[in-house]
Each structure stands twice: as structure tokens, then as C-alpha cells.
Image: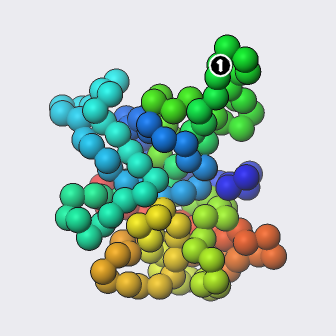
Amino acid sequence: MALKGPREEHITTSTYRMNETASQGIGTWVSTGGSGIGLDSASQLATAAGTPTSGTARFIGMLMTEVVNIDQTKQHINWHKDQVQQGNPVRIMRDGWAITNMVYPGINPSAGDTAYVYHSGYFTNVDNADSNTKVGFFETSEDEDGYATVYVKLPR
């Protein structure tokens, strides 16, 4: 589990698809962009692992749906876990807060710390100018289970 129940989503987008499995609460990056509005475009792809130093990868928000790769002839998507099959559109939060355990191990953020996202999609409070992107702030420190409240606030 990567997200706990309470959250507040102000701005989300569902214009990107993911062709890989990923957990809720992880940071997402543009893999390839579509043209025009990009709706229902197979070329409008997001990824959970970006490379911000490449100059082309851009952070687009926190993944709010779990992306799975299952044989749907044998089992169903678990709608209660907000799952989607890979290759389908995903919901990405661009403005709002959520409680996630996708916090880079060992950093121990404090409430009010600036939140950056590492190229792996994990959130951190460490400003490494070479590979981190500022995305918002931590509203809380980590609890005993490794969850922290991260407020994502991206420019419009």
C-alpha cells in the first residue's frame, strides 16, 4: 500500500497512460507527450522513473491509481484499490495532498520542509540540484510506518 485514505485532490489529470506497473503515491514524469490535447492518445505516456537532468523529462505529479499487469481472463481489476491495467489512462494529482510511503529511505523529513522528487519517483527533502525537482512541501514528518503527508503544488 502506498497511499493512506485521507487526501485532498485539487487538480488532477487523466490524459496520460502508463505502460509499466507502478504504486500509488509515487512521482510521475512525462515519458512521451502527445499532440494537441493528448486525450486518448497512446503516445501520451507517463513513467515512474524519470531523468530530470536529461532536459526532456518533466515531473507531472503524484500517481493516484495503482497500475497493474494482470491476466484479466483469470482475475478482475480490484476497483476498491483504484487499480488500472497498464496501458490505460491513470489519474495524476498536480495540486493537493496525500499520505504516501514513497519517501526516500532515511531522510526523515520534517513538517514544512520543501518536497523534491528524486528521479526514482520517491519524495525527499534533500535539494540535490543535479537530480531533484522541487514539487511542494511536507505537511508532516514520517510516522512509524514510513508515511508522510506530501503537498504537491505544481505551476499551472
Q: Quadrant of residue 70?
A: top right
Horizontal and vertical percent position of residue 141: 67, 80
- Residue 34 visible in the picture: yes
In the displayed structure, 110 sits above or below 27; it is below
Check the image and name the residue furthest to the right. 144
- Please give left or right for residue 144 compared with residue 61 in the image: right
Residue at point 60%, 36% (across, down): 68
Residue at point 57%, 67% (across, down): 150
Residue at point 37%, 59% (across, down): 50
Number of other residues with Cα within 10 Å of mark 1, as a class: few under 14, some 14 to 19, many 20 or more: few
Horizontal and vertical percent position of residue 52: 30, 66
- Residue 95 visible in the picture: no
- Please give left or right for residue 38 compared with residue 150 in the image: left
Nearer the observer, 56 or 94: 56
Horizontal and vertical percent position of residue 65: 58, 41
Nearer the observer, 149 or 87: 87
Marker count (numbered): 1
> Disc 1 marks which residue?
72
Residue type at mark 1: give it.
Gln
Horizontal and vertical percent position of residue 76: 71, 21
In the displayed structure, 30 sits above or below 130; it is above
In the displayed structure, 129 sits above or below 97; it is below
